[in-house]
Amino acid sequence: MNNDRAWMYQRLDSQGCLNPAFLNGVENFMEYAISRPSSLDGINIQCPCFNCKNIKFWNAEIVKLHLLKKGFVRDYYEWDRHGEPDVVRQSGEPSSTHYSNTQDRRDEDNLMYNMVMDAAGPSFNPEMPNPEVQKLYDILDSSKRELYEGCETSQLSAMAQMLSLKSDHHWSEACFDQTSQFFKGVLPQDNTFFDSFYSTKKYMEELGV
């Protein structure tokens, strides 16, 4: 399989039409994904479109339609949700320390996501109107929700790390609150960071984490 995946983010050509390279790439991606049993949940696969963000499961035709209409979720060069066993790097991707740190955050968020999926089991269907399923869906959504637009760290990961810091360094609730309020204030507007220990703990408990 061609490791050059620039086509994934070149959906439209200069005329605003679907790029032939993108169409061909989507076909190859779908063939690859459905040929990997580990990526299937019955007849459904995770949808890596810009809106579903590898959270929702759909059949192959719907996933293909979503990709053609909305494109891929950002930075999904490694098809780890669709049976790819090895890390694939684009030749143009940076190899600086900054990139390594970013990749570590992605891996941590992916680890949280995979832990939730493992706990849910192969029969998990986020479309079923079941309270337990809804709780799992909320956790999955939180594990992919950006802390702010363009941030590589998810809301769930950020809040879990804050609770871990409190435990490791024996922070008081007042210290936790002041630190949270500081981060909340310096992060971009409309961020999803919680500004108190109470709201963070309540959020995690509601998710069942």
Image (cartoon, rainbow, N blue to C red):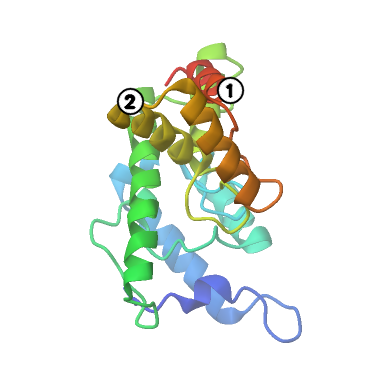
Q: Position of residue 30 (x, y in %)?
A: 45, 59
Q: Position of residue 198 (x, y in %)?
A: 55, 19
Between 57 and 159, the one lying in front of the other is 159
SS type, badge 2:
loop
Report if residue 8 is visible in the image: yes
- 140 up-or-down from 146: above or below: above
Image depth: mark 2 or mark 1 in front: 2
The amino acid marked with disc number 2 is His
SS type, badge 1:
helix
Between 54 and 41, the one lying in front of the other is 54
Task: Tell me the residue at 56%/46% (across/down).
Answer: 147
Single out the residue that lies furthest toward the left: 86
Horizontally, is 190 left or right of 61 in the view? right
Task: Tell me the residue at 39%/37% (across/down).
Answer: 161
Report if residue 42 is visible in the image: no
Horizontally, is 74 left or right of 172 in the view? right
Between 77 and 18, the one lying in front of the other is 77
Between 77 and 69, the one lying in front of the other is 77
Task: Tell me the residue at 50%/14% (across/down).
Answer: 132
Q: Specify the quadrant of the image occupied by residue 185.
A: top right
Q: Position of residue 183 (x, y in %)?
A: 56, 44
Q: Label 2 belongs to which residue? A: 170
Marked residue nearer the N-terminal end (2 or 1): 2
- How many numbered dots are placed on residues in this image? 2
